Image (cartoon, grey):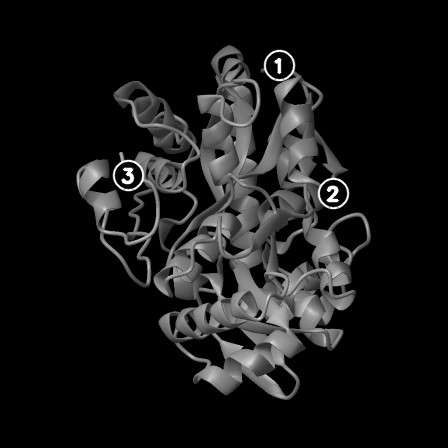
Amino acid sequence: MTGEAHVKIGFIPLVDAAALLIATHKGFAKAEGLDVELIREVSWANVRDKLAIGRFDAAHLLAPMAVASTLGLGHVRVPLIAPINLAMNGNAIAVSTALHAELAAESEVAHPAQTARALAKLVARRRAEGREPLTFGMTFPFSMHNYQLRFWMAEGGIDPDEDLRLIVLPPPYMVENLARGQLDGFCVGAPWSSVAVDAGVGVILHFGCEIFARAPEKVLALRESVADDDPNLVAALLRALHKGAAFVDDPQNLDEVSQMLSRPEYVGVDAEIIRRVLTGHLRIKAREERADADYLIISKDGAMRPDPWQAEWIYAQMLRWGQTRYSSEMADRAKGVLRPDLFDAAIDRAHSQREIGAFAGPSLDGRNYADYLEGFAIGQRV
């Protein structure tokens, strides 16, 4: 890479894009010889398609979407790589105030297993009464939002493909559809569940980290060919993002980061909501708050280093929900999306990863997909 490189990067208005947004806004990218043009998009399909055809050089992307694109699932096959994680966790399952009241009447609304069983009772009652099934929103079929909803529901005995409706909506549209009664609940990245709570139309039922303790949520994705052609560009991007993440995670910068992200060209919601997201101290309904330091993880505990095992786990979720069929070749392709070698070449630090840690069900051990899937009552088998 010679001179200053112009790089177009697409993103969705979510707090988990913070490292990218701050790296650009604060000049960390410029210091690495990068002229970054950030392009705000509404839907994940737009981001994926523009990355695939070369309109974007890189993108803030759903980790499962990067795997799906590489495998040719739901779209033409475009091999992508993800040399850095932008965020772990950050999602929440929110429900309408009406559905929350119904769940609370059935059971204590606390552990995900309790709420899943309560939801199953409501689903069965609606079916017996001939009423319309419940409708939940998620941002894309190949997303942690989809897998978190399905994992949670299935633990209560609900078949998400038969017992209710799961529909795709862009993140900024979730709150509006909940308010109109077109959704009964959704799983989405921050800050949109908090926006629903502040608007008085929703209640946060579970943080995403209560379903999966350390879910690989967003990555910086590039076409594999771009990474092969210009490894210096990739390294410069990674260094800039690492500096951006460090700035975000420094408590002294909390107010500044919250104000920056609140700007309309970035996330575009009130800075106080963003501040709560970054601290993991959220208002879950009127006059009630809940805190979890792992609600959204940007860089702590080595979170930015991608691990091929995370891609294998994502592939296992795709198998469970019938999004693909097993083959050793596909498993290897999935594993190759996350590239710690590129991260290690650019960021010379020791890192370790913790397991994803689902709240229920078996562990994925040694790529034994068949045994893993057999451990679930609901889902596909290899």
- x 68%, y 51%: residue: 171
Decide if residue 118 is in sight here.
yes
Specify the amino acid type for callout 2: Val
Q: Of circles 3 and 1, which is in front?
A: 3
Residue labelled with disc 3: 381
What is the C-alpha distance between the residues marked 3 and 1? 50 Å
Q: Earlier in the sequence, mark 1 or mark 2?
A: 1
Residue labelled with disc 1: 2
Quarter of the image for residue 259 reads bottom right
Disc 1: CA contacts within 10 A as few (<14), some (14-19) or many (>=20): few
Q: Is residue 11 above or below residue 87?
A: above
Q: Quadrant of the C terminus?
A: top left
Disc 3: CA contacts within 10 A as few (<14), some (14-19) or many (>=20): some
What label does residue 86 carry, if any? none
Q: Of circles 1 and 2, which is in front?
A: 2
What label does residue 42 carry, if any? 2
Q: Nearer the viewer, residue 180 or 65?
A: 180
The percent position of residue 76, horizontal first and vertical second, equals 56, 18
In this rendering, position of residue 225 left or right of residue 309: right
Specify the amino acid type for callout 3: Arg
Quarter of the image for residue 141 reads top right
